[in-house]
Image (spheres, rainbow, N blue to C red):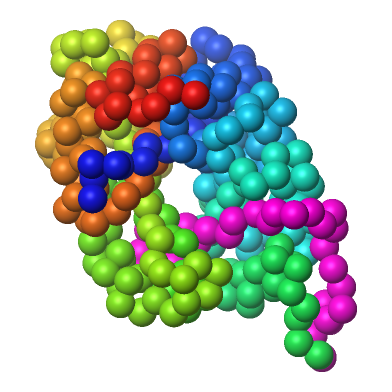
């Protein structure tokens, strides 16, 4: 299955020490152009709020910028945190995006807040908003696909414009069995956030999705995984670059979400507990040369029986990030655009 492995990208517009935050947004657009030329299948952008480490707060806006700078690669959200918003408005936004890039738009949705609960309340004051998620997905699916909602529903007879010959592709995102079950129920493609759980629960969620799947938007189960990985020209250089991400992960365990440090500034003495966590992280993370990381991506895809892997890479230097994606594209033999 992994012989024809499709490779995609998830980018979060990471904030970096010593660099203006607006530069991170522009780097995301430049990375999308770069990855299209390298032959990547999709380019997805995340949504986070009030996190000093991640400044990608509005994927739908970034997608518009990427749409006008690319011509082939699929563009998507990973994802829109639907409980914050009106499904009708989201449908309108993504129909506009589909008009800009017909047949290239992915609408990935999730239930997580993308930040803390205080910020979530600012986006939607309803403390029970996430409980409405399944209903929101059903409404969004109808408006995106041009279907009518049942009689008696407030949205019955209401359409989302603009219409076109294509429609956005709805995806369910998740890092647990909940999203897998919902994707299976609605017959949606499913993406598991492997990078969030370090793989824990991934196989079980995918199995649940496939077992419970009912044909809907797609006729058969369609799944991918989002994996954190970093490649460099040498293994030594890859581990040096990884110091920035490693420090961010250790700090996150203590609730600190700071901008990414340069590798040389990221190294600090660790407590015994932090060192234990750091060693566990190093045993599971995909870091090395392009050939080494590509082999691990292929093996993971084969193990989980998926045909597509989306790679997320954090580096302080945007050129190192672009080089990582270039090396993986070369090692996996992606056809250049």
Residue 318, horizontal then vertical, whole percent: 46, 15
Q: Is residue 157 magenta?
A: yes
| Image location (x, y in percent) of residue 331 | 25, 24
The quadrant where residue 252 appears: top left
Question: Which residue lies at the image location 37% right of the left edge and 52% below the top edge?
Answer: 224
Residue 298 relative to residue 174: left or right: left
Q: Residue 120 at what x, y percent from top left?
A: 63, 55
Q: Measured from the top left, where is residue 325 in percent x and y?
A: 37, 23
Judged left or right of residue 298, residue 73 is: right
**Of all residues shown, which one is farthest toward the bottom?**
152
Q: Does 131 sit left or right of 324 as displayed? A: right
Instruction: Give the total number of marks visible in the rendering.
Output: 0
The residue at 36%/28% (across/down) is 334
Q: Main secondary structure of the magenta part?
A: loop
Q: Which residues are magenta?
A: 152-179
* Viewer-side residue, 116 vs 291: 291
Q: Residue at coordinates 39% horizontally, 27% vertically from top-left?
A: 335
**Magenta span has 313?**
no
């Amino acid at each position: 299955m992994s012989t024809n492995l499709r490779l995609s990208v998830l980018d979060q517009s990471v904030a970096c020490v010593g660099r203006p935050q607006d530069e991170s947004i522009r780097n995301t657009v430049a990375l999308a152009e770069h990855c299209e030329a390298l032959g990547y299948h999709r380019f997805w952008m995340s949504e986070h709020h009030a996190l000093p480490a991640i400044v990608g707060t509005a994927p739908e806006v970034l997608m518009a910028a990427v749409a006008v700078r690319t011509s082939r690669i699929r563009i998507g959200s990973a994802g829109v945190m639907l409980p914050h918003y009106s499904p009708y408005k989201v449908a309108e936004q993504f129909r506009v995006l589909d008009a800009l890039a017909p047949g290239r738009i992915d609408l990935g949705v999730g239930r997580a807040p993308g930040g803390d609960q205080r910020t979530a309340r600012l986006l939607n004051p309803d403390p029970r908003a996430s409980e409405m998620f399944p209903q929101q997905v059903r409404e969004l699916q109808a408006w995106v696909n041009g279907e009518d909602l049942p009689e008696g529903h407030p949205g019955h007879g209401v359409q989302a414009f603009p219409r076109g010959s294509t429609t956005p592709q709805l995806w369910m995102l998740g890092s647990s069995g909940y999203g897998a079950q919902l994707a299976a129920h609605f017959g949606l493609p499913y993406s598991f956030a492997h990078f969030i759980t370090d793989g824990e629960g991934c196989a079980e969620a995918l199995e649940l999705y496939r077992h419970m799947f009912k044909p809907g938007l797609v006729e058969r189960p369609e799944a991918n995984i989002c994996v954190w990985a970093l490649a460099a020209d040498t293994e030594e250089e890859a581990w040096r670059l990884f110091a920035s991400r490693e420090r961010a992960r250790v700090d996150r365990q203590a609730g600190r979400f700071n901008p990414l440090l340069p590798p040389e500034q990221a190294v600090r003495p660790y407590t015994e507990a932090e060192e234990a966590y750091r060693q566990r992280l190093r045993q599971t993370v995909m870091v090395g040369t392009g050939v080494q990381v590509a082999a691990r991506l292929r093996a993971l895809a084969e193990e989980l029986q998926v045909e597509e892997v989306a790679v997320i890479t954090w580096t302080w230097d945007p050129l190192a990030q672009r080089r990582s994606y270039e090396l993986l594209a070369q090692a996996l033999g992606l056809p250049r655009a």
